[in-house]
Amino acid sequence: MVYFIIIFCLGFARQCDDTANDGLGSLKTLVGTPTYLSPEIARRSPHYGSKTDMWSFGVILYVLIAGFPPFSDNEQHALFRKICKCEYKFHKQYFGHVSMEVKNLISSFLEVDPKKRLSAKEALNSAWICSDDSTFMKTDLLCGGFGLSIFFR
């Protein structure tokens, strides 16, 4: 059986000039779900760009594997501190079977400095994205620690 996961929300979609404001981007509206917010949004930076979406994608990828977000706290200020400090772990129970390529990709998305964070174009050239899919096709994502199982209960 093959599952396809499509992730998108166009509610706040905008065109962005990532070269504006010394490479920080041209977007100004602070929106998003707290758990998925990038450090620049959590810090209320005056400008941000498309790399804030790449941070969110890193959080989504982490959740799909582990079943829970890399940053969590019941108190929003504490959550934002964890996000801004990038305090997360690859728990062995959930990531022990995950390749270094996947962990490196997540870490490249969860980079505090947006100028160092992987862009969408760069992600398409990552080792994991470019790898042979035969290994991936043999992996049962609904067991073995993958958090994906929570979506199919």
Image (tube, grey):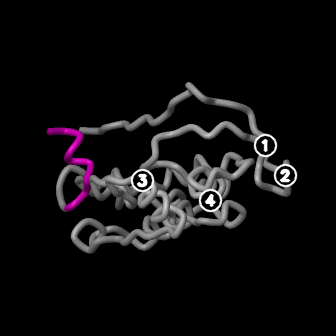
Q: Earlier in the sequence, mark 2 or mark 4?
A: 2
Which residue is identified by label 1? 26
Q: How crowded is mark 2: few (under 14 residues within 10 Å), some or many (20 or more)?
A: some
| Badge 1 vs badge 2, beta-carbon distance below 8 Å | yes
Q: How crowded is mark 3: few (under 14 residues within 10 Å), some or many (20 or more)?
A: some
Location of residue 68 by image quarter: bottom left
Q: Tag 3, which secondary structure? A: helix
Q: Which of marks 1 and 4 is nearer the N terminus?
A: 1
Magenta span dominant secondary structure: helix
In the rendered view, would you say 127 is above or below 152? Answer: below
Q: In this view, does 54 lie to the left or right of 60?
A: right
Let me know if residue 70 is in the magenta part: no
Inter-mark Cα distance, 2 to 3: 29 Å
Q: Which amino acid does label 2 sit on?
A: Asn
In the rendered view, would you say 104 is above or below 136? Answer: below
Judge depth for marks 2 and 3 and give the one in front.
2
Judge depth for marks 2 and 4 and give the one in front.
2
Q: Tag 1, which secondary structure? A: loop
**Badge number at residue 125:** 4
Judge depth for marks 4 and 3 and give the one in front.
3
Q: What stretch is highlighted in magenta?
A: 145-153
Q: Earlier in the sequence, mark 2 or mark 3?
A: 2
Inter-mark Cα distance, 1 to 4: 25 Å
Q: Tag 2, which secondary structure? A: helix
Q: What residue type is labelled 1?
A: Ser
Which residue is identified by label 2? 21
Q: Which of marks 1 and 2 is nearer the N terminus?
A: 2
Q: Residues within 10 Å of mark 4 (few under 14, many from 20)?
A: few
Tell me residue 78's x, y (percent).
42, 61
**In this view of the protein, which residue sits in the foreground, 56 or 29?**
29
Inter-mark Cα distance, 1 to 3: 26 Å
Let me know if residue 150 is in the magenta part: yes
